Image (cartoon, rainbow, N blue to C red):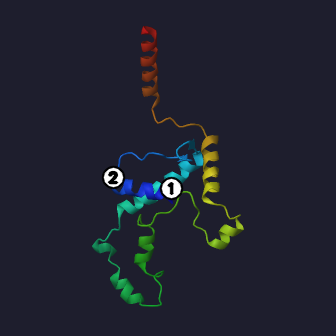
Amino acid sequence: MEKTLTTLPLTLTGADIIQGIGLIEGSMTLSLEQMIVDEEIYNHCMRMHQGIDVCQEKDYFQDIKEVAQGGHFLKQKSTRKAFRSQEFYNSKLIPGDSYDSWAEAGSKDIYHYAHEKVEKILSEEPISPVDSNTEKLVREIIEEAGAKL
């Protein structure tokens, strides 16, 4: 909860940097699982920052009138279209199963899923954000600077 309360104002104001990703215990410990959880918190906060699209195309008042009290919207084309839109944030970390499915699968908490993701990331080959030509150039510059020292 604290992580969300410190992340939300930063995302809503458009901050360029969010500090403390993965840090716990008063910023004395770095947790890879917490980094994954913090990413999920950030994604939720960014979805909130994007707001709600209230364009004419998404004016559902006619659907509300047609369905009326006690009905459901599952047969409405607009519901299917809206559900497939970016209006809803679908967690990349937590499965959206029912409570019964979650309980049958072992009642795993968010840190269990984060740990699984950390294990998967660590088992894969590292991905360099720098292309090989740039990396080669940087190594040459470092070697040249080292030779001059």
Q: Quadrant of residue 97?
A: bottom right
Q: Residue at x 63, y 72 (%)?
A: 99
Number of the label disc, if any, that sits on residue 40: 1
Q: Residue at x 54, y 53 (%)?
A: 37
Q: Quick one: label 2, few (<14), some, or many (20+) residues within 10 Å?
A: few
Q: Quadrant of residue 53?
A: bottom left
Q: Amino acid at mark 1?
A: Glu
| Left or right of residue 3: residue 54 | left
Of mark 1 and mark 2, the one earlier in the sequence is 2
- Asked whether the beta carbons under mark 1 and mark 2 sit within 8 Å of each other, the answer is no
Q: Position of residue 126 (x, y in %)?
A: 56, 37
Please identify the residue farthest to the front as the structure is shown: 26
Number of the label disc, if any, that sits on residue 21: none
Q: Position of residue 20 (x, y in %)?
A: 48, 46
Q: Quick one: label 1, few (<14), some, or many (20+) residues within 10 Å?
A: some
113, 5: nearer the viewer: 5
* Gap in angstroms between the C-alphas marked 1 and 2: 17 Å
| Left or right of residue 13: residue 91 | right
Q: Position of residue 88 (x, y in %)?
A: 44, 66
Establish if 23 lies above or below 143: below
Establish if 28 lies above or below 139: below
Q: Residue at x 65, y 55 (%)?
A: 112
Q: Quadrant of the C terminus?
A: top left
Query: Which residue, given by chain and number where applicable, does mark 2 sit on?
Result: 14
Please identify the residue farthest to the bottom as the structure is shown: 69
| Left or right of residue 4: residue 63 | left
Q: Residue at x 36, y 88 (%)?
A: 65
Please identify the residue farthest to the top as the structure is shown: 148
Q: Amino acid at mark 2?
A: Gly
Establish if 24 lies above or below 97: above
- Tell me the element at label 1: helix
64, 57: nearer the viewer: 64
